[in-house]
Image (cartoon, rainbow, N blue to C red):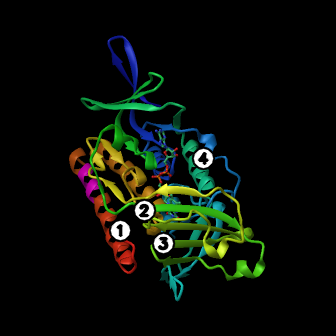
Amino acid sequence: MAKLNLIGNMIEKVYDVILIGAGTAGLSSAIRCLQHELNCVMITGDITKLDYPFQSTPAESVHPGLDTLMNMLSADKAITSNSRGTYTRIYDGELFQELGRDENGAWTGTHIDKPGFVKSLFSVALSYGLNTITGEKIKTIKREKDYIIVNTSTGNQIKSRFIIDGSGKEQVAGKLLKIGKTNFSNPIICWSGLSRITNNNQMASLKTSFQKYGQNWLWLAPEINHYCTWTQVSTGKNKIYQAPVALLNASLVSPIQIHSMRWRLYNQVYTDRIFLCGDAAGLLDPSSGQGILMSVMSGIFAADTIAGIFSKEHSEAIAGSHYQQWFQQVFRDKVSQLNKYYAESSFNG
Ligand SMILES: Cc1cc2nc3c(=O)[nH]c(=O)nc-3n(C[C@H](O)[C@H](O)[C@H](O)COP(=O)(O)OP(=O)(O)OC[C@H]3O[C@@H](n4cnc5c(N)ncnc54)[C@H](O)[C@@H]3O)c2cc1C
């Protein structure tokens, strides 16, 4: 429930937090806000768009570190119930590299069904009592003294103390507020698909692998039921948007998806009670392998920061700049890591 303000003889609702976007960043921050008993509302696109059958879109591969975050969100089954395969090591064309190891053995990553994963997070958020507004386009975001006002295409006005933007590549708040951003790479294009392999020997030969050839990178994620997701990334000019050579004889299950993945980061991911999270704050190509992890981490961090401000544990300015420094540092560290990998090839990130 939102708080109610009395203005003259009119009553208006004021939320603690407006969340934009029901992706992994938006839903993680929503669950965390609700765990902190903040009043929040999520403005989302059409949720029925998540109704893809299992294993009908390319999988996304998640780092084992995501398990801990899912436990924090009471969404501990979200990974296993949407698993399409697991891996403990990655083949680079010559050698296998383990993800890591501790006293319990090798770490395990998971190729997840992304729409299913998002649906699982959404149902956890609903079980905490998430309010949603769907089918409304955000037209403006304005600040008014201590409040932020979101105006939508239907003339609806929604008021809150804070905003968390998890709108992904749409980057709604960054665009509407005209926040400056920096490109950290030349144009990079990524295309991906899901293939079905009927030949048993061919399937058995596929390994979770990350390999470079020329100006391209290829990520292969073999899955259960004789499927394999592939993702290619290129800075080259002459690209052919097709499955990788090794899978040209397999049948394509999903249409090939093409994305511009130039590395880019908003110069301010926190500005005056507005937090940008996940891809809405900064975007790297999928070879960073941690887009989902970063979206969940930043969503949780933003929600915890807001809860700390409400409980007067932190001052608004210090807490906001802490978030800003953390996100920028993590992003820049990843850029240096990727540049190091790419420097070894003709890639020029
Ligand atoms: C081809 C490809 C492969 C990838 N593979 C991997 C991988 O293997 N592992 C990995 O960790 N990451 C991978 N990533 C990256 C990962 O998908 C993203 O980093 C991650 O999903 C970002 O989450 P997000 O919540 O910030 O954004 P999204 O998941 O994009 O969510 C944004 C949400 O906001 C909603 N929205 C947008 N505009 C509006 C609006 N105006 N109003 C309301 N709602 C709005 C959208 O509908 C969506 O629900 C891959 C990306 C691509 C493109």
The span from disc 1 to disc 2 (Cα, nearest Å) is 8 Å
Residue sitting at 48 percent across and 38 percent down?
Answer: 42
> Magenta segment, which residues?
319-325
Front disc: 4 or 1: 1
Residue 306 shown left or right of residue 77 in the figure:
left
Task: Give x and y (percent) for residue 325.
Answer: 26, 58
Foreground of the two, 199 or 278 = 199
Q: Main secondary structure of the magenta part?
A: helix
Task: Give x and y (percent) for residue 75.
Answer: 56, 56
Check disc 1 and give the amino acid type: Gly
Instruction: Choose the circle earlier in sequence order: 4 or 3.
Output: 4
The span from disc 2 to disc 3 (Cα, nearest Å) is 10 Å
Residue topped by disc 4: 123
Q: Quadrant of residue 225?
A: bottom right
Q: How many marks?
A: 4
The CB of the residue at mark 2 lies under 8 Å from ligand 1: no
The CB of the residue at mark 3 lies under 8 Å from ligand 1: no
Residue topped by disc 2: 188
Residue topped by disc 1: 349
Front disc: 2 or 4: 2
The span from disc 4 to disc 1 (Cα, nearest Å) is 38 Å
Q: Which mark is residue 216?
A: 3
